[in-house]
Image (cartoon, coloured by chain):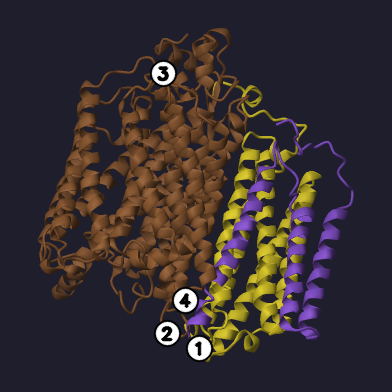
Amino acid sequence: MSQSHVKANEKHPLFPIKNVIGFVLSLILTFVALGLGAAHILPFGPIMLIIMGLAVLQIAVQLFFFMHFMESDGPAYHVIGLTIGIINAVAVIGGTIWVMTFNSQVH
Amino acid sequence: MFDRIKSFASDFFVTGEPMIYASDVAIVLVLAAIIFTLTFLKKWKWLWREWITTVDHKKIGIMYLVSALLMMFRGGVDALLMRTQLALPDQNLLDPEHYNQIFTTHGTIMILFMAMPFLFAMFNIAVPLQLGARDVAFPFLNAVSFWLFFFGALLFNLSFVIGGSPDAGWTSYAPLTELGFDKGPGENFYLLGVQISGIGSMATGINFLVTILKMRAPGMKMMRLPLFCWSVVASCVVIIFAFPALTVALALLMIDRIAGAHFFTMLHGGNPMMFLNLFWVWGHPEVYIVVLPAYGIYSEIVSTFSKKKIFGYKTMVISLMIISVVSYFVWAHHYFTMGASAGVNSFFAVASMLIGIPTGVKIFNWLFTMFRGRISMKLPMLWTLAFIPCFAMGGATGIMLAMAPADYQYHNSYFLIAHFHQVLIGGVAFGLLAGMYYWWPKMFGFRLNEALGKWGFWFFNIGFYVCFMPQYLLGFMGMTRRVSTYSADTGWTDFNFISSIGAYLMGIGFLFIVVQVLYSIKYGERDLTGDPWNGRTLEWAIPSPAPHYNFAHIPEVKEVDAWWGMKERGESLVQLNRKKKFTPIHMPKNSGIPFIMAVFFFISGFGFVFGWYWIAALGLLGVAICMIARSNNRNTDYHIPAEEVEETEAAYGRV
Amino acid sequence: MALSNNEAKQRSSKHDTSRLLEYQRHDGPLNILGFWIFLATDLILFACLFATYLVIRTHVDGGPTDKDLFEIPGFTIETLLLLTSSFTGSLAVYEMRNFNKKRLIGWLIVTVLLGIGFVGFEISEFVQYVGDGATMQRSAFLSAFFTLVGTHGAHVSLGIIWMISIIRQVVKFGIEPINARKVFIVGLYWHFLDIVWIFIFSVVYMTGVVS
């Protein structure tokens, strides 16, 4: 448990530059998604793919700019936990949609 | 006015069944006896101070164990009633409606209110002691979990005398459970009871995961963890990722019933199969939640009673973790017959069969551990030995069921019933009983009588095979599950009769276990060494029963079997006591909030069951107040003075 | 208690001042890790709700569809309110680490107000839909919509009450290890809800707009 990443004596920035960058990034990502959605320049599939990609970037922004994701006392167990959580979340959503497509086949 | 009260009461209380009137009388008498005894012996204060408000993991573990055994009794009586009804054709002991209720409560109780708390009893008793910790990571939350389970189970069992039991099976499939088909409060009891105890289970999963990750004794790296702790890690990982799915499935069904939504209805675009999907996203991992810790228990026992290091520690750990991950990708095998695409069925069939591989690895590792070991045939080892062939057979029939095309034949037949009883009794119940015998001296400070236990073991085991082997054949003969009776010309009479005899043999086995416990309380051999089995892990390094603070000095861990290693080097914790100064020990304070909060959950749940929303709201308000009170309480821990620690150790003769 | 405060501190819950305030007490790292794991479970809970929504999104039973209902200005305002509140919430933790009690409380209050604004807009959105006859009982699609978005709204409302309770404790006890841990954890919760909202924005609202 030697590699503690929670040292207090690191220089604390005088201006919350990281937080501001995060905020600006999240706004940009949101407006790009909105613009793409409203403009109807691409068909449904590709647009949704891009929008979902932007949403994934938003997760990264929240985690790294706001949530101090890499801070931990000892090994970063929460990183492993959240990673498995995300994999399982994708599995539940993807698996469910796949399993339940019987809807469209049976009729 | 009187008529109104009368008609209300006849709806509110379950009426018309002589069996239930008898139970009513029994319940009232037992309650009166308990209240009288507690008052007569002036034990109310003791009960509140020592048990209800406790946050000590050892006491919480004992409360889990007692509740689990009581629930095993109730679920067992349900099973005997069913087997009595089915022993001969065309019987009328239970009418079909009553039969539906009995198999529903049997299933729900056995898996959620017997296996789960029994498991949590083992977690609580063994994990902190094996880690060399003084309590779990969140002792207060641990108490909350227990009381949520307790009141969830109480709410569920209340349906027996008030309002009527649920009758749609333990899986509670929609649309049968929708308001249009199932008006009664029974289904609400199921939804609320399971939901409330489910919150507790989820909290337990988080609690023990953090405990194991963060509170190990110095030197105990992850790859030096006792295998039981590893199995708890695997089980907790499954708990935290599977239980939310149950929460959602039950919540959506409740919204359907209470708010008239259309998730799983047949009208307005609802999709009943979606309930099955969500239910089994939890339901299949759930069987791994209960069986993985049992694997851990077997690993401890096999190693201890063969006097050998476990064979293939690393492969044991890897196979545990593989099972916990793959278990998340098999859920659709519970409804192959739904008619999903061939791709879906193939994927889930292959994933289900894959689980057999790491499980097989574990079986071989246990066998190789025993190979050339000096095996001592004590009760825990006996149950472990019985587990291996039983589980291997259950696993093999599981592979048969996992083949999607073949499953169309076995689906919902008695073949399935026999299969899952074989893995759940042979795998889980045997493991839990083995664990109970193994850790009993550590919990209570005395051993259980071996002779009576052996009688119990043989009755239960022979009874098991007599009961369930014929059911495989009945399945092949076309008998489907959940039928309340059958006619003689089906030709099922003989096997059903044999099966019922087996069930009664198992019942006798359980009675022997009860007698064994009662007898041993009085005459059991005291365990003065703290290490009655010549154990290998840290829980055997401290006296039995463990002192409140567990370890006066926390030892340094140097290898996998920490206590065995210490013994080989001639070390002990008594030496540590002599070498080092006693220091004050930091402990969490007892609290009444978990109990009171769970009571409010119960009140709220009861309100929802009968649609009395003002009571439900009142209950939730109480829950919120409890949470805020806890959040503002800053006086949550204390120190046991060094002198008191020294005195306690001296009383054990360990200074 | 027989021990003086100082002794007790030294002996058990070592206040290691070289670490961040929220990790100094013995239970700080435990609670923070526990809360991260709780967030992972909450993630699965929302995943199940999203899965349900996606499966029955098209089951409108002749009633209003997502395209009919969702209007860009409404959900954009909600999104901006929540994104901004996530930003101000992170500033609260920043100020806490600068030991600036006044600003910490200030940013927490701003975060709560933005949260209340978000919930307000969401309620008015729901009221409008219900007024138009798009109730939860109308179709499976609407059941799933109200449940998914409503569950998120309930989480935010709970977060608001939680944050108010923590503001009260910061006012009373100042910036010390217990409060630091509480502020940090409620911050994690708040950012997590922002992540969930981004997916509601993308999966629910944008899908409706694009289709």
Which residue type carries mark 4? Answer: Phe
Image-quadrant location for residue B377: top left
Helix, strand, or loop for circle 3? Answer: loop
Q: Is residue C181 left or right of residue B286?
A: right
Choose the circle earlier in sequence order: 3 or 2. Answer: 2
Structural distance between the alpha carbons of marks 4 and 2: 9 Å
Marks 3, 2: nearer the viewer: 3
Disc 2 target residue: B267
* Image x and y of residue B205, in percent: 51, 46
Q: Are marks 2 and 1 on the same chain?
A: no
| Chain letter belonging to callout 1 | C
Other-residue count near label 3 (Cα within 10 Å), few / some / many at <14 / 14–19 / ≥20: some
Disc 1 target residue: C61
Chain A is which colour? Answer: purple
Structural distance between the alpha carbons of marks 3 and 2: 64 Å
Which residue type carries mark 3? Answer: Asn
| Chain letter belonging to callout 2 | B
Other-residue count near label 4 (Cα within 10 Å), few / some / many at <14 / 14–19 / ≥20: many
Residues at circles 2 and 1 in contact by the CB criterion of under 8 Å: yes
Structural distance between the alpha carbons of marks 2 and 1: 9 Å
Disc 3 target residue: B534
**Viewer-proximal residue among B477 and B164:** B477
Structural distance between the alpha carbons of marks 4 and 3: 56 Å
Which residue type carries mark 1? Answer: Asp
